[in-house]
Image (cartoon, grey):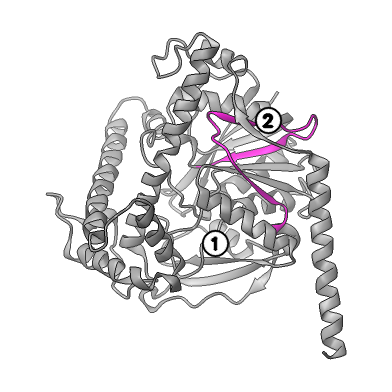
Amino acid sequence: MTVARKIFSFHAFCAALLVSFAFFSLASGAGEVRVRYLRFDEVQETLRLNADSGLPGSEIAESAAWDAWVRTRDAEVRSRVDRGIEDSISNLILYGTSFTSLPRVESVERASSESGELAPATIARIHALALALPSAAKNERVRFVRDFLARQEIAKNSEERYFAENLRRFIAEQAAYQKKLQEAAAEADPSAVYLARGTLFETRGLSVDTSLLPNFALEETLRAMARKGVLAPGSMHRIAVIGPGLDFTDKRDGYDFYPLQTLQPFAVLEAAARLELGKAEELQVVCLDLNSAVIAHVQKLSERGRAGQAYNLQLPRDPRAVWSPEAISYWERFGEILGSPTRPLPVPATLRGVVARAVAVRPQIAARMKAYDANIVTQTLDFPAGQGLDLVVATNVLVYYDRFQQALAMANIARMMNRGGIFLANNVLPAQHTNDLEYLGRRTTAFTPSGAYGDDVVVYRRR
């Protein structure tokens, strides 16, 4: 071994040692945090406020009934994880490019005829995914699909029928969601659409997909709050991301030519650091999710960070999707605090025009991530006194629950937060929640110059 290599190895060893020491200090300082079911005494105020709602569970009046309901409800919610994976598989069939060179389907509306028959292009892509299954070892997402089919005990040579049946169900559900929104838009109340969106997916499978732009809306909201003096420099130490998700193949602008990745934990940490609400190397991010694949992914990237390995994020963008200059600027500077630019993976020829950049997240940052298997509606975490959460983010998560369950989640979030902590979501939430959360307002961020595509962020502060 040359002297240069010895010096490099020694420096790499020291870097990994420092990362490990930082994480050990973080874990030991925070104490052991466990996940448990919410107790009856912790939800009585939410039950009282929602007693007349008529929603399942809101009528409970004694401890034993609550203990039974919360466990049954937790199991029911978790049963929707597999349906969410099936939705992700449908998106992969329609838009994936890693398993086929066939053109992508333009939209879910173009995937079938008005009578419900799958279009020839859709059938061809179903066939292509089925053909790719035997060689799944070369493709992480196809391997994910193959393993899921095995768990579901889908017989060999029946995969295409399974994909087709699932895709028909997926297309019909998407049409039903659009119809619900159109009916709300036809009402005289201008807030009807916003209210309809608030519980739009309360019976849908729990999706794993994620994308970049909702994080732009979060950062813009935090920036506006900092400018108004609502947030003080250095006020954040611990952040929670509920449902961080994986970039599988998002339904609007997702791609699959790079490994699975999670974006939001890093995006929120960077936003806090950019706005000087906390230091990047000192902020801790806690991820709460129900999907074992998401939890395992976050745990693995954190372990690799403690071992001194960077975490690469691929950031594709289609210039034909007309983003606002501010949204483009966000994409261009994303990761500047997290790490350094690295060479992006090549974009497939079938995605002509798509551009990409990539960021290598520093190991010290990746090591700051921690994941828990927790249902925000039914389960809570007991943080040591004074070491609660300063910022909680839940985008495209609470929309999967009814109003009563959303109120339970809000009370649960409040109990895990420090006083003065901030909670951000991107769907309207019920007014019948405990007084621990103070509503501060709603902010709209446009992703396009016309404002036709964007996101609304609602803001609460822990009293």
Which residue is label 1 attached to? 328
Task: Categorize mark 2 by other alpha carbons within 10 Å: few (<14), some (14-19), many (20+).
Answer: many
How many residues crowd around disc 1 within 10 Å: few (fewer than 14), some, or many (20 or more)? Answer: some
Seen from the viewer's position, the closer of residues 59 and 151 is 151
What residue would you read off at disc 2?
416
Establish if 75 lies above or below 145: above
Q: Nearer the viewer, residue 130 or 167?
A: 130
Residue occupying image coordinates x 61% and y 54% = 298
- Determine the secondary structure under disc 1: helix
Q: Which of 159 and 127 is in front in this view?
A: 159
Label ID, residue 449: none
Q: Where is residue 289 in the image (x, y as percent from the top left)?
A: 55, 43
The x and y percentages for residue 455 are 49, 44
Q: Residue furthest bottom?
A: 2
The label nearer to you, 2 versus 1, is 2
Distance (Cα) linking label 2 and label 1: 35 Å
| Residue 178 image offset from top left, x and y in percent | 29, 41
Tell me which residue sits at (36%, 25%) in the image.
189
**Can residue 71 be found in the magenta stretch?**
no
Q: Based on the displayed image, in which of its 4 quarters is residue 388 positioned?
A: top right
Mark 2: amino acid: Met
Q: Give the range drawn in magenta.
A: 366-395
Is residue 21 visible in the rendered structure shown here?
Answer: yes
